[in-house]
Image: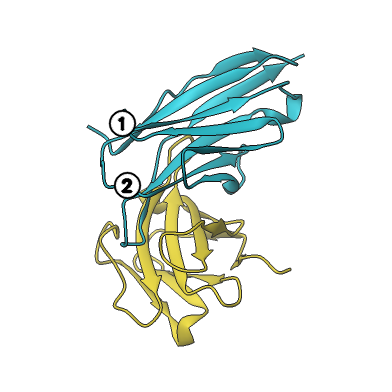
Chain colours: A cyan, B yellow
Amino acid sequence: RKEVEQDPGPFNVPEGATVAFNCTYSNSASQSFFWYRQDCRKEPKLLMSVYSSGNEDGRFTAQLNRASQYISLLIRDSKLSDSATYLCVVNHGSWGKLQFGAGTQVVVTP
Amino acid sequence: GAGVSQSPSNKVTEKGKDVELRCDPISGHTALYWYRQSLGQGLEFLIYFQGNSAPDKSGLPSDRFSAERTGGSVSTLTIQRTQQEDSAVYLCASSPRAGLEQFFGPGTRLTVL
């Protein structure tokens, strides 16, 4: 079983709609969580950090469910510019290596 | 402010040659990471430096790969006797300290002919 698993998608979303997707992690000792977005042929860019039960940043909401070991990302009022691959990232503890998921592709259509 | 920079942005080399890739992290960041990403694939962890501690080399795919970090700042990833399967984008990231958010450079696209 992979340490961080994501549905690869693609999630095809009409412009203005809401899309949500999850990421599951295997290590119950994981302490911090992040969502990154990666555009085609570009480097990953930090979207949100998720340090407690969740947080919201504009149209983006991340939630953490420690009991079920997953984090979710919800995008409201989708824009064409939201089309990207969203990477779920997990830190297991004091050791600094972050575990990256393979990504969920989101395609927002006009 | 200045982000992570990498050079060169593109590198084309012949099979069997050695290459050096450079990363300048964000000033003050103590943790530095190297990853590679093949086309359409996820990130593959290579090596991680934290301050003056011994680096974590657990992700290096073979002994042809090595990396240094001088003075706790600039890092160089060296690939000796390059092979075609080494072709990928090599990404560097830095973090204020281990376990926190990582900030990525634009990457070096390596093509081995």
* Among the 4 quarters of the image, the one containing residue B18: bottom left
As displayed, is residue A70 above or below residue B76?
A: above
Quick check: A87 above or below B6? Answer: above
- CA gap between label 2 and label 1 equals 12 Å
User: SS for tag 1?
Assistant: loop
Q: Residue at x 74, y 68 (%)?
A: B1
Nearer to us: label 2 or label 1: 1
Q: Residues within 10 Å of mark 1 (few under 14, many from 20)?
A: few
Q: Quadrant of residue B83?
A: bottom left
Q: Is residue A106 left or right of residue A27?
A: right
In the rendered image, the vertical position of residue A35 relative to residue B75, given as above or below? above
Horizontal side of B16 relative to A58 (left or right) equals left
In the image: residue A29, left or right of residue A79: left
- The answer to which of A95 and A54 lies nearer the viewer is A54
Name the residue carrying label 1: A67
Residue A52, disc: none
Q: Residue at x 31, y 62 (%)?
A: A95
